[in-house]
Image (tube, coloured by chain):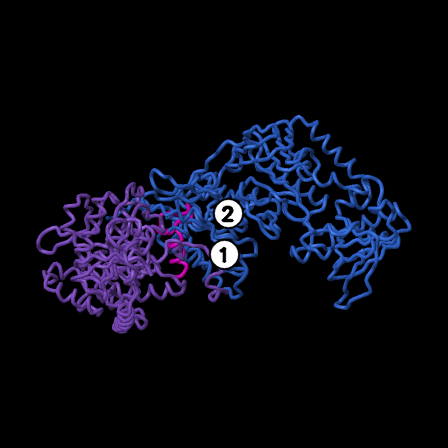
Amino acid sequence: MRARALIYPAGDKMKEKIGVYVCECGPNIADNVDIDKVIEVISALPEVAVVERHKLMCSEDGKKFLKESIQKNELTRVVVAACSPKQHEATFMKVCESAGINPYLFQLTNIREQCAWIIADKAEATERTIRYIRAALRRVPYQNALEKKEIEAKPDVIVIGGGIAGLSASLLLACGDRKVYLIEKANTLGGKVKELDKLLPRMESSSNIISQKIKEVENNKDIEVYTNSEVTEVLGFLGNFVAKVKTNEDKELELKIGAVVVATGFGMLDIKQIPRYGYGKYDNVYTALEFEKMNTEGKILLKNGKSPKSIGIIHCVGREERGYCSGVCCTYCLKFANYIKSKLPNAKVFEFYQELSIPGKAYQKFYEDTKAKGVDFIRSQDIEITEQKGTLTVNYKAETQTLEPQNVDMIVLAPAIEPNSDADRIAEMLKISQGDGGFFQEEHPKLAPVSTSMEGIFIVGCAQGPRNIPESIVQAQAVAGKIFSSLIPGKKLEPEVKTSEIFEALCIGCQACLTVCTYGAIYFDEMKRVCVVNEVLCRGCGNCVGSCLSGAISTKHFTTIQLHQEVVEALR
Amino acid sequence: MSKVLKINKSAEDGVRELLKFLLESGKVKEVFTLKKINSNNVVSYSLITRAEMIKDAVPLFPLMPANAGKLLSSLTLKNPLSEPIAVVVKPCELRAFVELVKIKQGSLENFLFISSTCPGVYPLDMEVNGDLSKKLLEYWDTVKKGKIIPDIRPTCNGCEHFLPYTADMVVSLIGKNTDKECEIFLTTNKGEKFAEGIGKLVEGELETQEIESLRNERKIEKKKLFDEIKIEKFGLSGLIETFGKCIGCHGCSHICPICYCILCTFESCTHELEPSAYESEIEKKGGMRIPPNTVFYHIGRLAHIGISCVGCGMCTDVCPVNIPISTIFLKVSEEVQDVFNYIPGKNIEEEIPLVKYDKEELTEVED
């Protein structure tokens, strides 16, 4: 019943020649760790062939020293005691490779962040350093040589959504050796920006700017535009996606691409859901986009064809209901006041806001200029619109106190920005998650704001959360940068080496691992009744290892035996 | 209330008549039941296809030569059954099978489950000794009285789950006149459908006063069982004392219906020590038990499958050195199962807590 070879091939651990290299990191380690003592203790261990120290191992001189010492001593395994693997693991792996030793037969142990910097007492820090080096020494003979692989990658990109973010990303990405497929659900490009009259804060014409972008896209021979079209399926992984697109002629297109940019934009909250604003019930209550349209057409008019003498602009419509601030409404409401003041200089304008959100270097001045034109800003809550004989009344409270209601002829509502109505379908299709408010979830809100948990799928603009135009363009540029650096035309991709592997003989086929893999990297082989890892997709997170009921899964370079040996020695 | 099929024969004859009917009418292709394999009360689980062979079937025989849950799993591991099979199993065997199906180690498709209000089974060595035959009269007599049967498996003594949870038909035994009357409760629509045409049905209630009082009696018995062992006071020395007898045959794991691993980690060399480890152990303690890892093996198994343990008692039964494994398992498993409010094998829809991811769970141990 003993299946020895199945678990791990037992090598002759005694034959390994292990070298230990202690870095002083200038004064960083040397000042608080007694390196002489460390070397004395470690050299006495039977499994150690050589122990050396260096002032700064990551320097050119240090790397050269390390390489030569590995070669001179004909080492088979290497332990470097230095800084955090985040900082220099890759550096020393390269040195090992150049010295002719597989980089996965090397172990970096962190004696700077985990000893020298955090333990005040030098003797204690020294003792801890010795302990960590011993743990690495115990682990390293159990490490296996791992080989890098290369796969072909397609540089082409599919952009879903032809609004300002999608257009900007497409223009940046398209170049001689990279094609962009721009897929737009509507019959024209331009998205919501096309519906705006003027843009803040310089009040230039929106249509000029967007039409110019659309023209550039349409004239770019490396961008294929499909309007009235929908992406229906995306399978694969970074560098090797296959997407299906249903085009306006009801044809199905199959596109081979390397990355997906999701620029599906936003929708607006349906204000009819909140009856107290009177939208759809009273005449002359408009949404922000309806008001933009009125301005684009040239005149601000009431239903009866007269000009309004007073207009109330209401911010924060649906903010509480949706649970977030949409960020862009305050500034465009200032813009609306300017629309009104330029067309109807004598009209009274009231801005009802809960909190004013006008950050940024240009907007404070814009706010003050707008205020100076005679616009009243009223901090208010619990707004309710009523109507009597054609006059609209804004009833509101301020600081829990009910104030005199304000009568106006016209009301403009600024509703919350919501994810596009397609967001759920797209999230499911791309296997990306949705976060706060139902917007697509970024990989990390600060450090990886345009990536998703699926490598090669990016999110830009309002698809990711409420954004204004410059922010959306910045994100489009960020995505272009990510794609430029990861999908270089003609260059192959190196998938993760430290992937999970499933021992077929131990797998009971319960498929628990499938449910915890967020990368879609595991499938079930019906014939063999076992689960199988797709090594190209796997990123070695180890979720599946933890979920496996029968202990059939391990992650390369983090096997149970390796971790066990390391921990046992660290705690001994 | 459910439909009841009444047959004026002894319980076992009644069940045989039902099985025969199912085979002859073509409603099932095969019958899975205990069957005599010689005249000496040696029984084994068997598949029967020919109606005339039903006469050798002993569907209610008070013995569990193997936990049928494990056998049904191996029947359906690769593919679900293509045609209906009637199986007669004990409630804990059915629960074990349901647990295995939850982790895709079998399929419930095309099974007609027949079980009974279970009086319990005798330990296997009683069959081996030949003592079992002498016990049968006393057994059925005590069943009739609805009392706890002397000398059955200790875990059966303390079992509260003797009413099957997911059977299609339930033979009512406890507190019934089993030598004259056979009452088969049709507890699902499927059960009713398969019984169509066999005879007249009446209405009845499976849960009776006798069952309730036996349940209470068994609760007391279980407490006694736990008190005898006092596992909560074990500590390391108690563990070593209890499992020190273990000869490492791993029979308990091989016979366990829940132990689903293809290769037990304790039978791989993962936990085998290197010479250096032996040396350092000896150096530290001045000596060590060989083979090592005995307590680790039992605790490991407990941690691994405790959540699904149905307390069938197979492990205690096969232990050559009489370690009360199933009592220890039952005690610990019940405590773990209580944490998740989980009864293994009760409901196929309910995922095994250790496999399922719940965002809000065990919040009391957070931070």
Q: Which residue is mark 1?
A: A111
Q: Nearer the viewer, residue A153 or B144?
A: B144
Secondary structure beneath label 2:
helix
Mark 1: give few (<14), some (14-19) or many (20+) Cα within 10 Å: many
Give the vertical position of A175 relative to A496 (above or below). Answer: above
Q: Who comes first in sequence, dot 1 or dot 2?
A: 2
Chain identifier for the purple-coloured part of the image: B
Q: Amino acid at mark 2?
A: Glu
Q: Which residue has dot 2 on it?
A: A89
Residue B83 visible in the shown view:
yes
Q: Are marks 1 and 2 in contact (CB under 8 Å)?
A: no
Q: Quadrant of the N terminus of chain B?
A: bottom left
Total numbered labels placed on residues in the image: 2
Q: Chain of mark 1?
A: A
Residue A455 % position (x, y):
54, 41
Residue A103, how many percent across, how many down? 45, 42
The region drawn magenta spans A549-572
Question: Disc 1 residue type?
Answer: Ile
Disc number placed over residue A245 in the picture, else none: none
Q: Is residue A154 left or right of residue B109?
A: right
Q: Position of residue A313 (x, y in %)?
A: 79, 53
Residue closer to the observer: A210 or A500? A210
Splitting the image into 4 quarters, where does residue B134 fall? bottom left
Asked whether, in this view, residue B239 is left or right of residue A45, the answer is: left
Q: Colour of chain A?
A: blue
Q: Please identify the quarter of the rendering in which residue B23 is found.
A: top left
Write down the quadrant of residue A204 in the picture: top right
Secondary structure, mark 1, is loop
Chain bearing tag 2 is A
